[in-house]
Image (cartoon, rainbow, N blue to C red):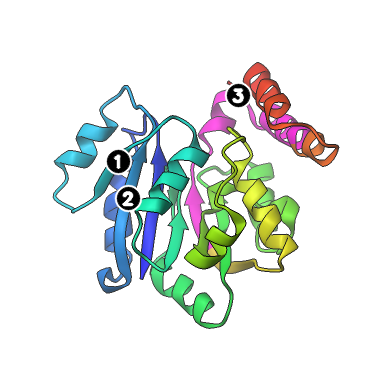
Amino acid sequence: MISIIIPVLNEAKTIKDLLFHLIDNASLSTISEIIVVDGGSTDNTKEIVKSLDLNIILINSEKGRAKQMNLGAKKAKGDILYFLHADSFPPLRYDKLILDEVNKGNNAGCFRLKFDSDHWWLRLASWLTQFNWRACRGGDQSQFIIRGLFEEIGGYDEKYVIYEDNILINELFARKQFVVINKKLRTSARMYRKHGVWKVQYHFWTIYVKKWFGASADEMLAYYKKHLR
């Protein structure tokens, strides 16, 4: 059984569509629960979730995706944890695709990515996500992982307010426990539209290189806040 965990903060524009998408594109016999973990939304995200007759579990958390996802994992009952951003929509029968990989012995992984943008660079970046390269990974692609492996790693490192997905992915690559499912997940290019494709890409690369050379979680967050928030 799969537990879907969605960290949210002011996601009123997308959360309803995402929740219906998850239910419409999976067999509910494989889904243990859908858990929405709110980090203190000030819009009507929580009210929307509560208003839907979908048996969604809504829990409150301290702000911070790592903290929110770890709390969701603690509450989850499923054998497989599936972490999903609120603006990312997985492919048809995503549940079966994940279960097929786990049954093959692949205990963690993600989907390929497709941005909701026709910008040539974002199309190229999306194309590159088919390859199992660490540099092409990120939280927008979603993350499935069996519970035992997640607990062995210690979950998401809560020191990281940004880059927490990549820290977990690094641990999975070190264990040779990562697979890319060759189906596309559609995600929003909203940050690229807000700041510009080249500015966002430059600063993301810079953050990646900073981490490579040993930057701390606080140093990376300070850089992100200065340039992209």
**Which class describes the residues within 10 Å of circle 1: few (<14), some (14-19), or many (20+)?**
some
Mark 2, residue position: 35
Kindly tell me whether residue 134 is visible in this rendering.
yes
The disc at residue 195 is: 3
* Residue at horizontal 52 percent and vertical 63 percent from the top: 145
Q: Nearer the viewer, residue 195 or 106?
A: 106
Nearer the N terminus, badge 2 or badge 1? 2
Residue projecting furthest to the bottom: 104
The kind of secondary structure the magenta stretch mainly shows is helix
What segment is highlighted magenta in the picture?
A: 184-207
Give the Cα distance between marks 3 and 2: 30 Å
Nearer the N terminus, badge 3 or badge 2? 2
Mark 1, residue position: 59
SS assignment at label 2: strand
Kindly tell me whether residue 123 is visible in this rendering.
no
SS assignment at label 3: helix
* Residue at horizontal 13 percent and vertical 50 percent from the top: 53
The amino acid type, in three-letter code, at marker 3 is His
Judge whether residue 47 is colored magenta.
no
Nearer the N terminus, badge 3 or badge 1? 1
**Which class describes the residues within 10 Å of circle 2: few (<14), some (14-19), or many (20+)?**
many
The amino acid type, in three-letter code, at marker 2 is Ile
